[in-house]
Amino acid sequence: MLAPSLLNRTGPFPELLAIQKALEDSGEFREVKVMLQTSSGDRTTGLHLTVTCRNKPTDYEQAGARIVAVVEKADPQAAQRDFIAVDFKEGFQAGLATFSNSRHVSHSPQQWEEILQSQAR
């Protein structure tokens, strides 16, 4: 059995682990999942993030842009991907009743950068 710290350094996709850790360390999320998504048909490669926020965003585009800023800081190669998608997972469970909802936002890294720049104005 390998120690978790050894796995983090030698796993097949250390950049995905770095992204997940950076988002978890922000304290803004209850749950974070990071996947590399590829399509052989149109030869696109992107990051697909699924997050459960501690506080519901008021603007999903802006929240996604802030997440992408953390992603690009943790993995500078993320800006070279064709897209970065963020699914905001929401919901609750009360006894046998379960409610879940997901909001999806996806853009190229350049489009995310434009959204970030518009926030700064």
Image (cartoon, rainbow, N blue to C red):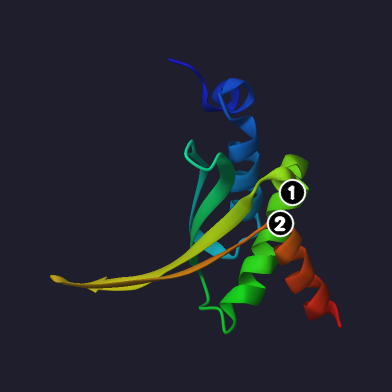
Identify which residue is drawn at 59% across, 26% down. Answer: 5
Q: Residue furthest right?
A: 121
How many numbered marks, from 0 up? Answer: 2
Q: Is residue 62 above or below residue 44?
A: below
Identify which residue is drawn at 67% across, 45% down. Answer: 81
Identify which residue is drawn at 78% across, 70% down. Answer: 114
Contact (Cβ within 8 Å) of mark 2 with mark 1: yes
Q: Is residue 32 above or below residue 116?
A: above
* Depth check, front residue: 24 or 117: 117
The image shows residue 22 at horizontal and vertical percentages of 66, 49
Q: Is residue 99 above or below residue 77?
A: below
Q: Amino acid at mark 2?
A: Pro
Identify which residue is drawn at 59% across, 38% down. Answer: 17
Binning the other alpha carbons within 10 Å of mark 2 as few (below 14), some (14 to 19) or many (20 upward) gives many
The image shows residue 62 at horizontal and vertical percentages of 66, 75
The image shows residue 24 at horizontal and vertical percentages of 59, 53
Q: Is residue 76 above or below residue 52?
A: above
Q: Secondary structure at mark 1?
A: helix
Residue that label 2 marks: 109
The image shows residue 4 at horizontal and vertical percentages of 52, 27
Q: Compute the Cα span from label 2 to label 1.
A: 5 Å
Earlier sequence position, callout 2 versus callout 1: 1
Q: Residue furthest front?
A: 41
Q: Which quarter of the rendered picture does the N terminus lie within?
A: top left
Q: Amino acid at mark 1?
A: Ala
Binning the other alpha carbons within 10 Å of mark 1 as few (below 14), some (14 to 19) or many (20 upward) gives many
Label number found at residue 2: none
Q: Which quarter of the rendered picture does the C terminus lie within?
A: bottom right
Residue that label 1 marks: 79
* Depth check, front residue: 52 or 1: 52
Is 100 displayed left or right of 110 in the figure? left
**Residue 64, picture quadrant:** bottom right
